[in-house]
């Protein structure tokens, strides 16, 4: 399995030994050794998967890196974090996905309707055993979700990912953006209940 590590908080190092890793196209900034780069499409779900990605806008340009050596990835000097998965499913915004093991399975999940327009909300899933590297605007924040503390509410622009036995739904509040001084955008929050972890960025700016 490829080895993921951080050279610093803005540079991901992946060591390959005749292995493959998938990454955001254009995110490779340097490499050592013998490497081959090929274009990929997020997900391996065939025609219907491609249609879901087109409708959901969860598609993203990917590249496959294969060979032996070290390859380095970065994106707009954003902060990078590594999330290990052990037979788990990660629900993640595709805009924050930097790199992941090719042994992991990807797909697109419908999360419900949002806003007055009733438009759909989709997210990308990454599932299996391996590492996922994400980037965020500032250090990634891990928030526990537990029935002991009640629901967790998150600004959709701060949301990065979640995993565990969690239910996500939309909480609509016409006053909440006005209260925090933001009058633009849709008046909803993401509500999480159950047991698991939600990852957010300390910014409402979209990565």
Image (spheres, grey):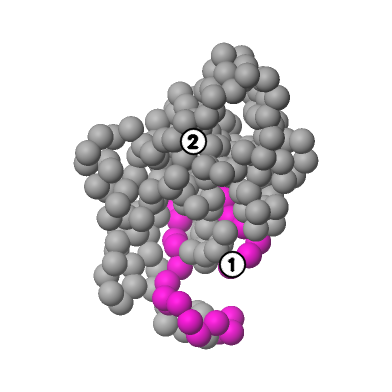
Q: Which residues are magenta?
A: 179-204
Judge by depth and name the residue closer to the eye, 82 or 71. Answer: 71
- Residue 51 in the image, given as x and y percentages of width and height: 24, 47
Residue at the spot of label 1: 205
Q: Nearer the viewer, residue 112 or 66?
A: 66
Tell me residue 82's x, y (percent). Answer: 63, 37
Spatial CA distance of label 1 from label 2 is: 26 Å
Return the residue found at the far left.
48
Which residue is denoted by mark 2 in the rendering?
63
In front: 182, or 11?
A: 11
Residue 186 on image: x %, y %: 42, 76
SS class, disc 1: loop
The residue sitting at the top extreme is 18
| 45 sits left or right of 17 in the view | left
Q: Which mark is residue 103?
A: none
* Residue 149 shown in magenta: no
């Amino acid at each position: 399995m490829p080895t993921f590590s951080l050279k610093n908080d803005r540079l991901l190092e992946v060591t390959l030994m005749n292995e493959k890793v998938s990454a955001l196209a254009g995110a490779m900034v340097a490499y050592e050794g013998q490497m081959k780069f090929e274009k990929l499409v997020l997900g391996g779900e065939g025609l219907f998967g491609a249609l879901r990605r087109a409708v959901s806008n969860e598609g993203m340009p990917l590249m496959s890196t294969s060979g032996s050596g070290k390859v380095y990835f970065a994106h707009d000097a954003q902060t990078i974090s590594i999330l290990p998965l052990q037979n788990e499913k990660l629900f993640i915004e595709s805009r924050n996905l930097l790199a992941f093991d090719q042994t992991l399975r990807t797909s697109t999940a419908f999360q419900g309707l949002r806003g007055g327009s009733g438009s759909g909300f989709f997210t990308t899933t990454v599932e299996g055993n391996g590492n996922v590297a994400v980037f965020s605007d500032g250090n990634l924040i891990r928030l526990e979700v537990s029935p002991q503390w009640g629901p967790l509410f998150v600004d959709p622009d701060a949301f990065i990912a979640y995993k565990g036995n969690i239910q996500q739904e939309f909480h609509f509040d016409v006053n909440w953006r006005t209260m925090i001084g933001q009058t633009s955008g849709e008046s909803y929050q993401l509500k999480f209940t159950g047991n698991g972890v939600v990852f957010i960025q300390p910014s409402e700016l979209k990565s």
